[in-house]
Image: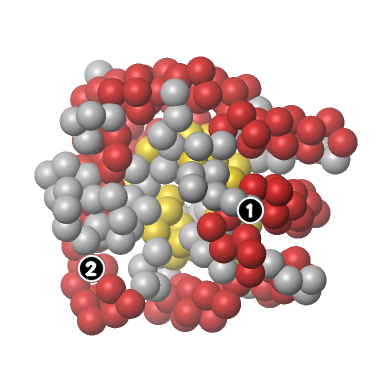
Amino acid sequence: MQLIDTHVHINFDVFESDLEDIKNRWQEAEVVHLVHSCVEPKEFPSIKALADRFGNLSFAVGLHPLDADKWTGNMGKEILDYAKSDHRVVAIGEMGLDFYKASNQKKQQEVLEAQLKIAHQLQKPVIIHCRDAAQKLKDVLELFWQEIGEIKGVMHCWSGTPEETKWFLDLGFYISFSGVVTFKKAQTIQESAKIVPSDRLLVETDCPFLAPVPKRGKRNEPANVRHVAEFLAELREVPLENLAQQTTHNACQLFNLSLAP
């Protein structure tokens, strides 16, 4: 069995002291590849160093919507140049909209649109963060398709309703579920997870955040993506091996990954 954790942040300081142990645990859990997301471009050197250290790590570069106010006039070129500089950059992001307690919604939209253009120029997928902003995000993406062209990507750590899920499926996006789907009160997310077509489903940890049951409340890590996969397999009434094979294939398709034999 093979699993891919499609969203990690193992460059955070909380992992610094025991990364080798963490690697051993993800290997024991049959996690064969990681996709490392990026909160802001200044992380690029540290993430690249992790890719040098771990051969089964690909990564993204971009600016998180909660950091939209850090956007500068040259940051778009910085992201573009970083993405061109290393073949292991498989996506742009994470980007998106986060309107929870936000007062800079217009700025977030501007930064999102700028990064969508970079991804379109490079023909790379996007990693989308969306919180309390599904309708606006849908509008932005639909307009982008009409005025500029197709964009592909993943709605990461998805927590939307089934109706919202269908919006982004109709736009061609993959839907990725994190440990949140395992939480007892996450019935809406679980209903969404039931309707995602098998060829559009991904799994992730978003570590170090949101550890799944039975690890909830602890530091999350890539090995725990297996718990997410196990829960989804039971929820969707399919064998774990089938779900693992399908989500691994989907990740390879979206991010153009080639797994080592």
Give 30 or 34, whichever is nearer the viewer.
Answer: 34
Give 249 or 58, whichever is nearer the viewer.
Answer: 58
- What residue did someone put label 2 on? 22
Q: Which mark is residue 60?
A: none
x and y, in percent, of residue 180 in the image: 29, 40
Q: Secondary structure at mark 1?
A: loop
Dot 2 or dot 1: first in sequence order is: 2
- Identity of the residue drawn at 63% across and 69% down: 70
x and y, in percent, of residue 188 in the image: 34, 23
The residue mark sitting in front, 2 or 1, is 1
- Classify residue 234 as left or right of residue 146: left
- Identity of the residue drawn at 54% across and 81% down: 45
- What residue did someone put label 1 on? 104
Which amino acid, mark 2? Ile
- Classify residue 51 as left or right of residue 140: left
Quarter of the image that includes the N terminus: top left
- Please say if 167 is above or below 112: above
- Identity of the residue drawn at 64% across and 48% down: 105
How many numbered callouts? Answer: 2
